[in-house]
Image: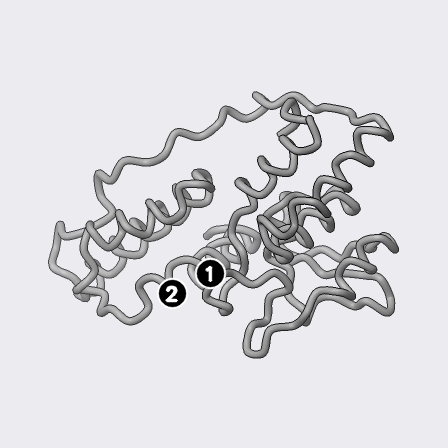
Amino acid sequence: PPRPSTVAYYEILFRCHVLPALGTKRVDAVTSADLERLHAAMRETPYIANRTLSLLQQAFDQAERWGWRPQHSNPALHMERYREERRGARKEVMLAAAEMARLLAAMDEEEPNVGPVACAALRVVFWTGWRVGEVLALQWANVDLKRGTARLLLTKTAAEEYRQLPAEAVSVLAQVPRVAGCPYVFPGQDLQGHLTTVRKPWARIRRRAGLDQIE
């Protein structure tokens, strides 16, 4: 059986990506075109897009075994995956104090262009050092601003992990408005799921700060 962390990861993929795109369709009505649209919408996060497609392929295989779809009708079969960056290919870049100051200033300057949600998420990433995906998936129910802690539901090493928030990150989070009906700290455009990528805002901020060498 899969590990609990793997199950938790699949649940997040299903809730955040599959249900918003396919939740109104019958299992036997989903087509390859539906999955291609979903995969294309996630092209800026190729790893997550590919994992979502793999999850769907397994799910439709099971649907065939249960008789919910005709045999050999898996719409995810033979779909082309995105090319993923080889692990370890990125090089770490250590920023000097002046460069970090430029980066923070660039976030302030670019906020009218890229939006307050993306900038707030990037500020939290900056002050915590957490992975972008961990920050974007934060839920208000798992953030305690008074104690300065957060419970992460999916990390690289565990399915659940408590972490301390630095004062600067608490200050950022305290200014983020809550959206009625959305459990996430950084909601996406549909105001139901969470923001799934900040790749383009991050690129603009790096350019403004003159720090294109960092990723």
| Residue at 72% across, 23% down | 93
Is residue 120 among the parts visible in the rendering? yes
How many residues crowd around disc 1 within 10 Å: few (fewer than 14), some, or many (20 or more)? some
| Residue at 64% across, 57% down | 116
Q: Nearer the viewer, residue 71 or 140?
A: 140
Instruction: Identify the residue under disc 2.
Output: 19
Is residue 158 among the parts visible in the rendering? no
Q: Is residue 1 left or right of residue 93?
A: left
Q: Is residue 136 left or right of residue 58?
A: right
Instruction: Identify the residue under disc 1.
Output: 16
Percent coordinates x, y for residue 112 in the rendering: 62, 52
Percent coordinates x, y for residue 76 in the rendering: 25, 47
How many residues crowd around disc 2 within 10 Å: few (fewer than 14), some, or many (20 or more)? few
Q: Nearer the viewer, residue 44 or 106?
A: 106
| Residue at 24% across, 55% down | 34
Numbered tag placed on residue 4 in the rendering: none
Helix, strand or loop under label 1: helix
Percent coordinates x, y for residue 210 in the rendering: 69, 26
User: Are dots 2 and 1 in contact, CB under 8 Å?
Assistant: yes
Amino acid type assigned to the residue bearing label 1 in the image: Cys
